[in-house]
Amino acid sequence: MTKESSVDTNWFLKKAAENDWTAFDNRVTEVSNIQAWVDWTNIGITSKMLDERDLAISLLEKTKLPFNESNELGLRGVLQTDENQHLRRKSAIALFIHGINDEEVLNLLQDAHQNDDELREQVAMLLAEQ
């Protein structure tokens, strides 16, 4: 994607298709503070491809770059309308990490804690830190 990054979205989509979530997550952490990747989330978060939406949410969750209204609106759109419940829960986590903890976000975090084995531990740690 950029000179700062040796991967592109296709690399992430390949890892997702292979269910290689460890490599996927490790690389997300590596690129999440590169502005070009955060800018890409505005496209990825509205993709028809589930794995692209997942990538966008993961990048926004991990980034330490300034979180803006466009980022919030993109995550809020997934949280409210995505057909994939797991992505809706991940969006709530990303919003919470960036300081947005309204009732809608908190309700979805509680749902993730109770019903999503993959997210349960992460949500418990986030809520404990609050």
Image (cartoon, grey):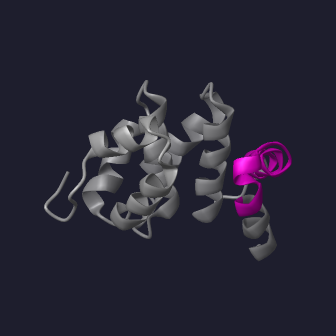
Q: Position of residue 93 (x, y in %)?
A: 65, 54
Residue positioned most to the right: 114
Query: Where is 24 relative to 35, above or below?
Result: above
- Nearer-the-camera pick, 19 or 13: 19
Residue 13 inside the magenta-drawn segment: no
Q: Position of residue 47 (x, y in %)?
A: 41, 29
Residue at coordinates 65% horizontally, 33% vertically from top-left? Answer: 80
Residue 86 showing in the rendered view:
yes
Residue at coordinates 66% horizontally, 49% vertically from top-left? Answer: 92
Q: Position of residue 76 (x, y in %)?
A: 58, 41
Query: Where is 119 relative to 128, above or below?
Result: above
Residue positioned most to the bottom: 129
Quarter of the figure that contains the C terminus: bottom right
Q: Is residue 82 left or right of residue 55?
A: right
Residue range of the region highlighted in magenta in the rendering: 104-122
Residue at coordinates 62% horizontally, 47% vertically from top-left? Answer: 90
Residue 99 showing in the rendered view:
no
**Location of residue 18 (image quadrant):** top left
Residue at coordinates 43% horizontally, 64% vertically from top-left? Answer: 29
- Nearer-the-camera pick, 51 or 24: 24
